[in-house]
Amino acid sequence: MASKTGIVTAPRLNLRSTPATEKPPIAGLARGTSVEILEIVRDWYRVRTQHGTGYVHGDYLRLIDDDPAVGFLHEREALRTAPLPPAAAERISPQPGFSSVEKKLAGSWNRQGGLLTTLSDLLGIDPAVAVAVLYVESGGRGFGADSRMIIRFENHVFWRRWGVSAPERFHAHFRFNASKSWQGHGFRATPDGAWESFHGKQSGEWRVFEFARQLAEPEAMQSISMGGPQIMGFNHSAIGYESVGEMFDRFQADIRYHILGLFDFLKGPGTTSPMLEALRREKFEDFASRYNGPGQAAIYGERIATYYERFRALRG
């Protein structure tokens, strides 16, 4: 983990000798006190202060980014060229008693564990956290059977990106529910053809996307969610790409960019973010509240925690 500074936000924050509350505190830190963060131990930080080294609870520190211009993960040569699978000794051999989830977790690790290890070391998180988040948020898959990346074409996004300027052409081929725009998606290749649903099969998603691409290529790319993490094309700048076309080409070329794209989305261009700090402290519901929305936080947080523990058990 990169060097970080924390500022005490509580009126008085106890500095303790261990990451627990059983023993009396070493000292009290006043609001506004600056501390150097040395290590993360779940909900606690080991810090260096004027009173010496000890532990404080992470809920009462505001982190300061010491290097806000660090850039995006996919720009790092060490990550772009890191071996994708783990070393042979680190691989997990499937056992007859493995559940379907355990088989998928092991398979995901055996395919991508090398990069995930390098990435986790850089970000200061447990590799099991990276595996669990990747599995929950992407299902562990980035490409279909035909070697094309997994996509989902969103009619309502294409409407906002292109259709409003060409409504007659749009409505001749695309439709969606006006009150719940993420529902009721339909497509027809000809203005007098029958409407058909296309979600659920990658062949259908790609057919509609390729049709829209002929009408307006950048806008069509902005209207699909891409690869394993299903990041929308219109978020290309948020993960460090100058154009949606560059993001599309990278994601189509290599699963590495799916993984790095997910963590670039979580981290942003600096060295940290509230989502990344939640993962470092293994506060999965807090992370899910920020990533999936507060309405789904408990569900997604529990899923991440479950897969985190199951993967740790697989690795012994």
Image: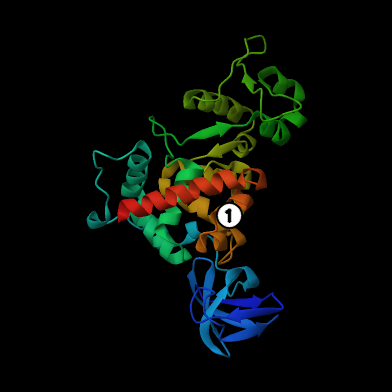
Q: In x, y percent, where is residue 231?
A: 56, 44
Where residue 146 sits: x, y (%)? 39, 30
Is residue 312 among what the camera can see? yes
Instruction: Indicate the amino acid at tag 1.
Output: Phe
State the residue in front, 47 or 3. Answer: 47
Please tell me whether mark 1 sits on a helix, a strand or a loop.
helix
Query: Disc count in the image?
Result: 1
Residue 234: where, in percent of width, then height?
A: 63, 43
Q: Judge from the rendering whether residue 129 lies leftward or rightward of residue 28; answer left or right.
A: left
Q: Residue at x 35, y 58 (%)?
A: 82
User: What residue does disc 1 label?
Assistant: 287
What's the residue at 64%, 28% (across, down)? 215
- In the displayed structure, 152 sits above or below 16; it is above
Q: Residue at x 42, y 37 (%)?
A: 143
Specify the quadrant of the image occupied by residue 188.
Answer: top right
Position of residue 62 in the picture relative to residue 80 (left or right): right
Q: Does residue 89 sit above or below 17 in this rendering?
A: above
Judge the density around disc 1: few (<14), some (14-19), many (≥20) Cα neighbours within 10 Å. many
Instruction: Tell me if residue 63 comes above or below residue 139 in the rendering.
Output: below
Q: In the rendered view of the protein, which quadrant contains the C terminus?
A: bottom left
